[in-house]
Image: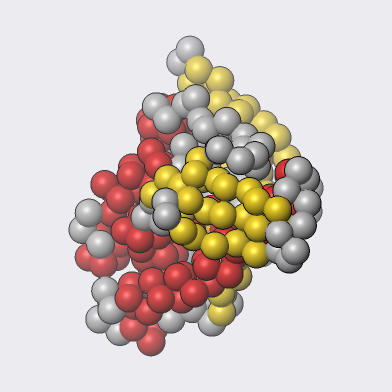
């Protein structure tokens, strides 16, 4: 369903937001890392009631946007050329691209080495690196999910029903109503403690679907230092 775009005035500020309606009972407002504001609303919610809710949360929205703005300017787009630095589990590695008879990626001596049949082709370099990241992500994320389940009194109650790894432009992760966990491929670039924050954040949604006060109590019990981990994640992957 196509998103609707609106704005509300709050003092000197104009808050622009998108609304996506669906079969849900509650309304949820989210501020994304790029500072955009999105609202997930029930189909029956009126435009006026949504605007009133956004206006009521305006101070919080502006606070979140200021939080994300501190990390700008963000890392320039990668060109996938030899000599660039790329992150893996929170550490910077120099990209080394060498000609070879077959394609492969190896982590060696402080570098990510791309052995490529066409080293001059940056698009192929990107594809090889992304494939390597995804393979590493599946192994590491499953390991970290298992570790994070131990943070809960009843691990079985929050165990995800599956894992999807994909590029997510505006989110680090999500948990579907059916319990399927989706994680942003970029998280493989973050340190394990930041990956644990995202996983734990999403596992808490198995207990409380919305970002209600109850949700944050659940998150605080599971991970008392979640705010520091979140900030570290944003700083490293800015």
Q: Is residue 79 above or below residue 136?
A: above
Q: Position of residue 157 (x, y in %)?
A: 39, 83
Where does residue 208 sit, x and y in percent of width and height? 41, 67
Q: How many marks?
A: 0
> Which residue is at 46% across, 47% downward?
93
User: Where is residue 120 shown, x and y percent of the image?
Assistant: 76, 43
Res 121 quadrant in image = top right
Q: Nearer the viewer, residue 11 or 18?
A: 18
Observer-nearest residue: 91 or 61?
A: 91
With 183 as the anchor, is 21 left or right in this view? Answer: right
Residue 73 visible in this rendered orientation of the protein:
yes
Q: Quadrant of residue 18?
A: top right
- Left/right placement of residue 102 relative to residue 49 reads right
Identified at 61% across, 28% down, the residue is 16
Residue 97 or residue 170, whichever sits in front: 97
Residue 154 versus residue 22 in the image, above or below: below
Viewer can see residue 206: no
Extreme residue toward the top, this view: 12
Q: Is residue 15 above or below residue 82?
A: above
- Residue drawn at 48 percent across, 21 percent down: 10
- Taking depth in this image into account, of 107 and 48 the one nearest to the observer is 107
């Amino acid at each position: 369903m196509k998103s609707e775009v609106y704005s509300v005035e709050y003092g000197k500020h104009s808050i622009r937001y998108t609304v996506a309606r669906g079969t849900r009972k509650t309304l949820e407002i989210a501020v994304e890392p790029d500072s955009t504001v999105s609202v997930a609303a029930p189909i029956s919610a009126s435009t006026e009631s949504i605007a009133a809710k956004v206006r009521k949360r305006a101070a919080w929205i502006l606070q979140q946007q200021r939080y994300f703005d501190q990390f700008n300017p963000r890392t320039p787009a990668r060109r996938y050329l030899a000599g660039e630095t790329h992150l893996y589990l929170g550490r910077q590695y120099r990209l080394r691209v060498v000609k070879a008879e077959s394609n492969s990626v190896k982590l060696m001596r402080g570098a990510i080495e791309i052995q490529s049949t066409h080293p001059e082709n940056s698009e192929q370099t990107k594809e090889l690196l992304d494939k390597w990241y995804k393979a590493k992500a599946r192994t590491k994320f499953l390991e970290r999910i298992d570790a994070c389940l131990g943070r809960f009194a009843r691990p079985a109650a929050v165990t995800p029903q599956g894992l999807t790894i994909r590029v997510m432009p505006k989110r680090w992760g999500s948990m579907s109503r059916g319990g399927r966990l989706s994680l942003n491929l970029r998280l493989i670039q973050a340190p394990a403690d930041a990956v644990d924050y995202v996983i734990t954040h999403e596992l808490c949604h198995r207990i409380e679907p919305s970002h209600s006060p109850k949700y944050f109590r659940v998150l605080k019990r599971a991970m008392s230092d979640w705010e520091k981990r979140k900030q570290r994640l944003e700083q490293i992957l800015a």
